[in-house]
Image (spheres, helix red, strand yellow):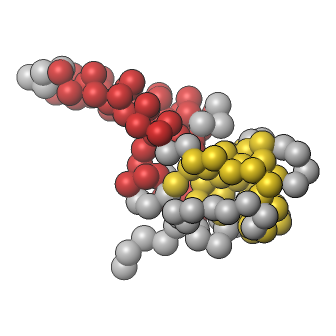
Amino acid sequence: MYLYLKLASRLAPIQAKVVVVQRLDAEAMSYIVTYVIPFLAIPFGDWQQGVALVIFFVVLGILYVNSNMIHINPMLNLVGYHLFEVTVDDGSTRALVTRRRRINRDVVLTVVKLGDDILLDKKNEYRPNK
């Protein structure tokens, strides 16, 4: 995830004026309940079950990236990112991944496109603690 965000932050930034905003952090919780919680009931008696779980999460990660759903990754919430649905001044509706806790209407953001409908707030890009 760190590498993906680091590479994405090098993309050319664009300006986007937010017209409508809605918070979507609950989608990450839906991911956890759907995919992670059921695995807590699986006994890990041998290494094969652990390998199967790792393979499952790798495949799930690849599917999320390829289907432009990287923004629903709960790891983003753990490192301080938040998810918003924003309508920008060109009329398009996009998912916005940002470290800001709040986004107001009529604010102009500097963002990079992570996918067709996903924006990353450039101002608050990910910097790990040193």
- At horizontal 69% and vertical 51% (from top left) the residue drawn is 21
Q: Would residue 7 be visible to someone looking at this image?
A: no
Q: Would residue 24 be visible to someone looking at this image?
A: yes
Quarter occupied by residue 51: top left
- At horizontal 46% and vertical 52% (from top left) the residue drawn is 76
Q: Residue placed farthest to the right in the image?
A: 90
* Residue 108 in the figure: left or right of residue 65: right
Quarter occupied by residue 120: bottom right
- At horizontal 77% and vertical 58% (from top left) the residue drawn is 18
Q: Is residue 95 above or below residue 79?
A: above
- At horizontal 42% and vertical 70% (from top left) the residue drawn is 128
Quarter of the image with the C terminus is bottom left
Q: Residue placed farthest to the bottom in the image?
A: 130
Q: Residue 61: x percent and y percent?
A: 49, 35
Residue 34 vs residue 108, the one in the foreground: 108
Q: Is residue 48 above or below residue 86?
A: above
Q: Residue 65: x percent and y percent?
A: 59, 38
Q: Is residue 27 above or below residue 123?
A: above
Residue 101 vs residue 49, the one in the foreground: 101
Q: Residue 53: x percent and y percent?
A: 30, 27
* Residue 103 in the figure: left or right of residue 53: right
State how many labels appear.
0
Q: Residue 32: x percent and y percent?
A: 37, 33
Q: Is residue 117 above or below residue 103?
A: above
Residue 48 vs residue 112, the one in the foreground: 112
* Residue 37 in the figure: left or right of residue 58: left
